[in-house]
Amino acid sequence: MTSMPMKTKRIKIHNITDISTMVHEANLICGDVILRRGKFAVDGTSFLGVISIVNSDEPVIIEYPEEAKQFDEFISKFGI
């Protein structure tokens, strides 16, 4: 089984509305969306997972399929 090539970005999410929108957008793509901070990783399609890892003062790493061009465009506004 081959895995899908993933793209990685450092992002900062600032509020609940941004988290909700990001989770909605993540659910629209085919493939995994993973958020990481330190040793923790959560499913980017889970509102509760994302809210548990996001801290408005610290960036997180997001990984998503390279082929998800529309999601890449969307998530770029949170890039640092």
Image (cartoon, helix red, strand yellow):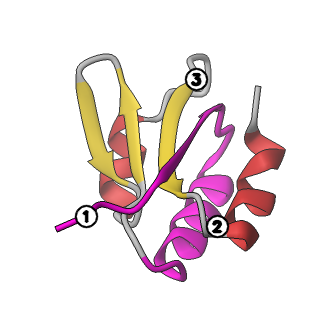
Residue underneath mark 1: 2
For the residue carrying disc 1, how many other residues have a C-alpha within 10 Å: few (<14), some (14-19), or many (20+)?
A: few
x then y, percent, for residue 32:
36, 63
Residue 59, numbered circle:
3
Give the residue at x 61% y 68%. 67
Label 3: state its secondary structure.
Answer: loop
Give the residue at x 50% y 27%. 55
Label 3 vs label 1, nearer the camera: 1
Front in this rendered view, residue 5 or 10: 5
Q: What residue type is labelled 1?
A: Thr
Residue 14, numbered circle:
none
Label 2 or label 1, whichever comes before in sequence order: 1
Residue 28 in the figure: left or right of residue 45: right
Residue 39 in the figure: left or right of residue 46: left
Q: Are marks 3 and 1 in contact (CB under 8 Å)?
A: no
Q: Are marks 2 and 1 in contact (CB under 8 Å)?
A: no
x then y, percent, for residue 34:
38, 49
Residue 34 in the figure: left or right of residue 18: left
Q: What residue type is labelled 2?
A: Thr
Give the spatial CA distance, label 2 vs label 1: 30 Å
x then y, percent, for residue 2:
25, 64
Residue underneath mark 2: 21
Residue that lies at the very extreme toward the left in this rendered image: 1
x then y, percent, for residue 35:
41, 42
Label 3 vs label 2, nearer the camera: 3
Identify the magenta region: 1-30
Q: What residue type is labelled 3?
A: Pro
For the residue carrying disc 2, how many other residues have a C-alpha within 10 Å: few (<14), some (14-19), or many (20+)?
A: few
Label 3 or label 1, whichever comes before in sequence order: 1
Give the residue at x 34% y 63%. 46
Label 3 or label 2, whichever comes before in sequence order: 2
Front in this rendered view, residue 20 or 71: 71
